[in-house]
Image: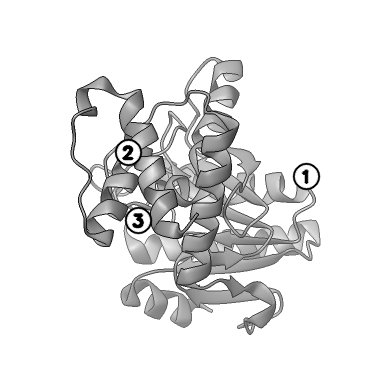
Amino acid sequence: MTQTERRIYLIRELLKEQPQYAELEIPRGEQEQRRLLRSLFNVRPPRPATPEFLEIQDEYLREVTRQKGVTDLKDLEPVRDGIYLWRGDITTLRCDAIVNAANSQMLGCFVPCHGCIDNAIHTYAGIQLRAACAEQMRRQGHEEKTGTAKITPGFNLPCRYVIHTVGPIVYGRLTEKEKEQLASCYRSSLQLAEQNGAESIAFCCISTGEFHFPNEAAARIAVDTVLAYRERCKSGMKVIFNVFKERDLEIYRALL
């Protein structure tokens, strides 16, 4: 199958699952089709899928990632011993673990084509990621607490693992509790990565987007917590601070 044939197959199968969209006409343009497919991935609840669907989905998503271009950690230059700063799309980074800024339900973002990192990671990992998260949450029996983390496979992402952590939501003036909760996100993720044999981990700017944590304060906590952990635990794990915006790049450059 061509990439276009895979995309149309996936759209048709996903539309069949939701009767309210059964009569929806598939657009002819590639960008419109890609947007529709992503939207359908985003709104799909965790449920089983056929082996054929998963095979075609996996082929499609891996080709999408190949076309975007994969960045390998081994090709990056550290800014200090074991510490890296990289601006780019974390869903294209090949390392052992990437960190997802999740919400307390841990099921990914259900808003079609939303710009958050949670949405992107779930989109390009494939529907298996939401199913894996849902199973963990079913066993746990309650929402994830702020500052804690869960680990899943990376599925169709270039990384081995995704570590999902719930950052604090800042509604007004930043509090000491929120600062400690954010630091806990970094510690929990580092500990979970090492427990699972990861030798490298990439952190996004946890809580600074939709959760409104001030960027400079968040970056300072991230750097201080990571450096303290590496020193205290004598950890040799490589840490990548992943940024997407120019502003965050400048903040981390100044700190590092």
The secondary structure type at the circle numbered 1 is helix
Residue 120 appears anywhere in the view:
no
Residue 229, percent from left and from top: 69, 58
Q: Quadrant of residue 251?
A: bottom left
Name the kind of residue labelled 3 in the image: Thr
Q: Earlier in the sequence, mark 1 or mark 2?
A: 2
Identity of the residue drawn at 62% across and 81% down: 76
* In the depicted structure, whether residue 170 falls above or below residue 110: below
Per the image, the residue denoted by label 3 is 208
Along the line of sight, which residue is nearer the eye, 185 or 209?
209
Q: CA distance from mark 3 to mark 2?
A: 27 Å
Residue 39, percent from left and from top: 29, 43
Q: Earlier in the sequence, mark 3 or mark 2?
A: 2
Which residue sits furthest front?
1
**Mark 2 nearby-residue class (10 Å; few <14, some 14–19, many ≥20):** many
Per the image, the residue denoted by label 2 is 40
Along the line of sight, which residue is nearer the eye, 243 or 161?
161
Q: Left or right: where does residue 39 sit relative to residue 207?
A: left
The secondary structure type at the circle numbered 2 is helix
Identity of the residue drawn at 27% across and 39% down: 111
Q: Quadrant of residue 236?
A: bottom right
Identity of the residue drawn at 44% across and 50% down: 6
Per the image, the residue denoted by label 1 is 195
Along the line of sight, which residue is nearer the eye, 202 or 178?
202
